[in-house]
Amino acid sequence: MLRELIYDPRKSGKRMKIVCFVSGSGTNYREIVKRDPDHDYVVFSNRPECGALKIAHQFHHKIIELNHLPYMKEARLKYGPGKIPADCPERLAYEQEAVRLIETELKNKPDLVCLAGYDLWHTSWFIDRYYPRVINVHPGDTVKGYAGLHWIPAARAIIAGESSLRSTTFIVDKGGDTGPVLVQSAPLYVRQTIEEEDSVNQNNLTKKFEEIEKFITSKGISTHEEYNAKSSPELKKYMEDICRVLQDALKKKGDWQIYPFAVHDLIARGRVALEGRHVYMDDRILPEHGCRLECSA
């Protein structure tokens, strides 16, 4: 694979056609737009009336809605809830119709697809059509494999003994959060964040965190699955409470910083190229963890 810019403003102009896929509150979408509203945004949602669409109305962006539930009804019966394969015919039919609506509106393919809190898997067909122009943000270090939804990546990092957390913006491939990394956030320090939360709300999170650390050490816990299997309901709740606080802080200090930075400061300026799985910024190959926010850019 030859080295290729994700977006070249010298050829395509300075206004990108950006499609943001949303399913929830839309905060990542909001932060992307706030960083630079001067692009042609289209918002696609599988969940009519989700909070993100209220933001899209405020921005006067074109909205395309396509409810996924009618497409997935038979698939749920066939495979079971939560077990629908990524490349099943029902998902393919849904995505082909979504792409038809989007490309009809744009009269072309989008320059960039931003998954901004979108809760459906994408098919291989979709990734093949747009790769490497689909990007996402994950509230964890994808290089280290801290996977999972919501607060689970923070739990995996704590169990691994990490003193800090990072969020990651990456190019979406056919794996689960496995694509080449563009940007990682500055570290969010675990104990410092917990202590700051305690100073404001007096939730005893520091004490709960110390109990978790003691349990992990004494039992030789090495995975989140093992923690769930061996811990008491009380310790499970401690972990969830702490990780929800950490993930909320990481969203604000991590996701909301690196996602707009990747879109506007890097991709829109023609600074990012891909060759195989190697990411280049300004013709300089980046390490596996991409450009960390504290790096000069």
Image (spheres, rainbow, N blue to C red):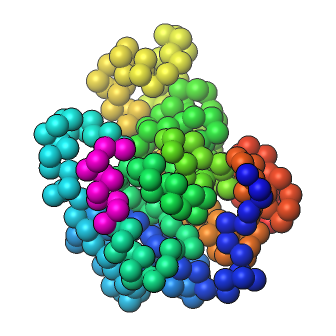
Q: Nearer the viewer, residue 10 or 253?
A: 10
Which residue is at the front of the view, 144 or 158?
Answer: 144
Residue 24 falls left or right of residue 169 = left
Seen at 63% across and 35% down, the residue is 144
The dominant secondary structure in magenta is: helix
| Residue drawn at point x = 45 percent, y = 83 percent | 107
Task: Give the x, y percent position of residue 225.
Answer: 41, 22
Tell me the residue at 49%/79% (across/down): 108
- Residue 88 falls inside the magenta stretch: yes
Above or below: residue 73 compared with residue 107: above
Where's residue 216, x and y in %?
A: 50, 18
Residue 96 in view (yes/no): yes
Relative to residue 104, is residue 93 depicted above or below? above
Which region is colored magenta?
A: 87-97
Q: Give x and y (percent) for residue 229.
A: 35, 16
**15 left or right of 289 in image:** left
